[in-house]
Image (spheres, grey):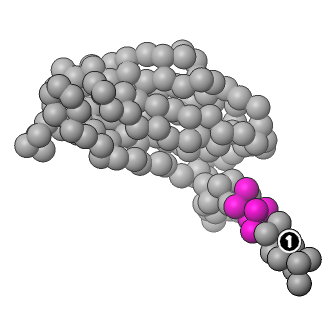
Amino acid sequence: MKTMDTIRRLALAALLLAAPAFLTYCGNADGGQQVSTDHVGPVGPTTPNGYYFEMTVSPQTITSGSNVSITVQVYDEQGNAAADVLVVFAGASNDPKESSVVTGVNGQGYFILQVKGPPSSYTYVTCTVEDKQLTVPVYITPGTISAA
């Protein structure tokens, strides 16, 4: 009985470790792999201005040295797009390590980040508005990825 519990736990652990790599792939018609987009948020209100914001990172699965596109949407307390808000992007394995943009009249800030890291690992992209942060994991695949 103790052996079966151990086997079940090991199987569950293996499934949980492998799941992120499988869940980020979507099949396309020719059998190639395409990657997903991750959207997090909204979070807020920030201090002192009471902003809310959300972040989208695409693609979420890359090969090392590839670029990810980051979009941040910032809103004021009434839900209107917030212009001229400083957004700071950072990541331990990214190039550059930290950068910032100011949102436009549509409340959006855009950034392209080159992500580096060992195959089969995760790196994290974080954006900060005032005192709040959102973080998205990016999986670095050991193989190649085809566009959709």
Residue, x 69% and y 45% (percent of image)? 145
Q: Position of residue 85 (x, y in %)?
A: 22, 23
Q: Position of residue 117 (x, y in %)?
A: 71, 29
Up/down of 53 relative to 27, above or below: above
User: Circle 1 sits on which residue?
Assistant: 6
Q: Is residue 85 left or right of residue 112?
A: left
Foreground pick, 131 / 117: 131
Up/down of 102 relative to 61, above or below: above
| Quadrant the N terminus occupies | bottom right
Q: Is residue 110 visible?
A: no
* Main secondary structure type of the part rendered in magenta: helix
Q: Is residue 135 visible?
A: yes
Kindly give the residue lying farthest to the bottom in the view shown: 1
Magenta region, residue range: 11-17
Splitting the image into 4 quarters, where does residue 82 fall?
top left
Q: Position of residue 97 (x, y in %)?
A: 54, 16
Q: Position of residue 6 (x, y in %)?
A: 86, 71
Q: Identity of the amino acid at label 1?
A: Thr
Marks counted in the figure total 1
Up/down of 26 relative to 105, above or below: below
Residue, x 28% and y 24% (percent of image)? 130
Q: Is residue 13 shown in magenta?
A: yes
